[in-house]
Amino acid sequence: MSVSWRRTAVVVALSAGLFASPLLGNIAGGELSALPVAAAKPSTAVADAPHLGSVDNFRDVAGTGAGYDAQGSHHVNKGVFYRSNALAANDADLATLNGLHLTAVYDLRTSGEIATKPDRVPAGASYTNISILSGDVSGGMGNLTSPEAAREAMRALNRQFVTGAFERARFAELLTQLADQQGPAVFHCTAGKDRTGWTSYLLLSLAGVDQQTIMNDYLLTNEYSAKSIAATLAQITAAKGAAAAAIYQPLLGVEASFLQAGIDQLVADYGSVDKYLKDGLGLKGQTIEQLKHKLIQK
C-alpha cells in the first residue's frame, strides 16, 4: 500500500464517519445535441433546502435564495441536485425528505461505510451505490503524527480525485447518471464534504459559478456540521487526549487548501474542468450539455 493511498484511507475513514464510523470508535477508545432531459423548474419557484438535525450537511447544490449566479446573467437551478452526508435520517427528517419528491439517491461510500450507517431512502427514490474509493478505507491510522500530516492527507485525497483512474471512472459514472436522471436527485458520502464536495465543485464549475463562490460553498460544511464535528472532537479528546484530538481535527471539517489541491492538480494535468471532464472522465459532449441544461436557469 502506497503512502499516498494510506493517507487517503485515513482521511476517508475518519473524516467521513463523524459519529457512526467504526474507525472513530477505535479513536475514541474503545466521506451538444438534442437534450432529452427537461430543464428543472425555475429557482424562484423552489424553497431553500431544509436544515435537518439528523442529516446536518444536507443542502442544495445551487445554494439559497435565487441560487448562485451562473454564467453571469443566470442562476443555478434550485431543487435539482442536492448534496448531503449519510442519509441516516430520523423519522421527522425522513418525512421532510419525502416532501422534496426526490427521485434518486446516489451513495458514494464504500460497502464498509454503508454497513456502519445505512441510508434511509426517501419514498419514491431509487438507490444507487457508486463507491468513489476502492479497498480498505480504515487503514493507515498510525501514519498521522501531526495536524499538518492530517491536512496533507486531505490534500492528497483531493488530488487523487484527479490522478486516480478508479476515482475518475466512478465520478464519470455518477455525472452520467445525474445527467440522465429525471427529477430531483441527491448524492452523498458519509460526511458530505470530500467526495461530495468534489462532485459539487464540478457541477458548479459547469454552471459557470465563480471560483470564490464555489470555495465558499465548499467551506459551508464547517457551519452545517459544526455541532457534530465538535461532538466528535470531544469524543476523541476524552478518549485519547488533547494532543490526539489536535492531530485529527483537520480531518473532521474542510479547509480551502484541501479543495484547492484538487483544483491545482486538475489544472496541472488537464488545464480546465472541461478538459478534465472530457479527457479525464471520458464524458460525452451530450452528457456535459445535459448537465448544464439542468443546472442553469434560463
Image (tube, grey):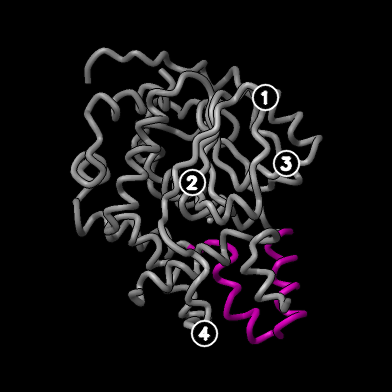
Q: Which residue is mark 1?
A: 123
Q: CA distance from mark 2 to mark 4?
A: 28 Å
Q: CA distance from mark 3 to mark 4?
A: 34 Å
Residue 39 screen position, x and y as percent:
43, 16
State the mark number for residue 226.
none
Residue 118 screen position, x and y as percent:
64, 46
Q: Which residues are magenta?
A: 227-255
- The quarter in which the C terminus is drawn is top left
Q: CA distance from mark 3 to mark 1?
A: 13 Å
Structural crowding at the residue carrying mark 4, measured as other residues with C-alpha within 10 Å and reported as few (<14), some (14–19) or many (≥20): some
Q: Is residue 223 left or right of residue 171?
A: right
Question: In the rendered structure, which disc, 4 or 1, sits on the residue that comes first in sequence?
Answer: 1
Question: In the rendered structure, which disc, 3 or 1, sits on the residue that comes first in sequence?
Answer: 3
Q: Which residue is mark 2?
A: 108
193 lies above or below 237: above
Contact? badges 3 and 4 (CB < 8 Å): no
Label 3 is placed on what type of residue? Ala
Q: CA distance from mark 2 to mark 1?
A: 20 Å
Contact? badges 4 and 1 (CB < 8 Å): no
Question: In the rendered structure, which disc, 3 or 4, sits on the residue that comes first in sequence?
Answer: 3
State the mark number for residue 89.
3
Q: Which residue is mark 4?
A: 146
Q: Which sits in the foreground, 76 or 109? A: 109
133 lies above or below 248: above
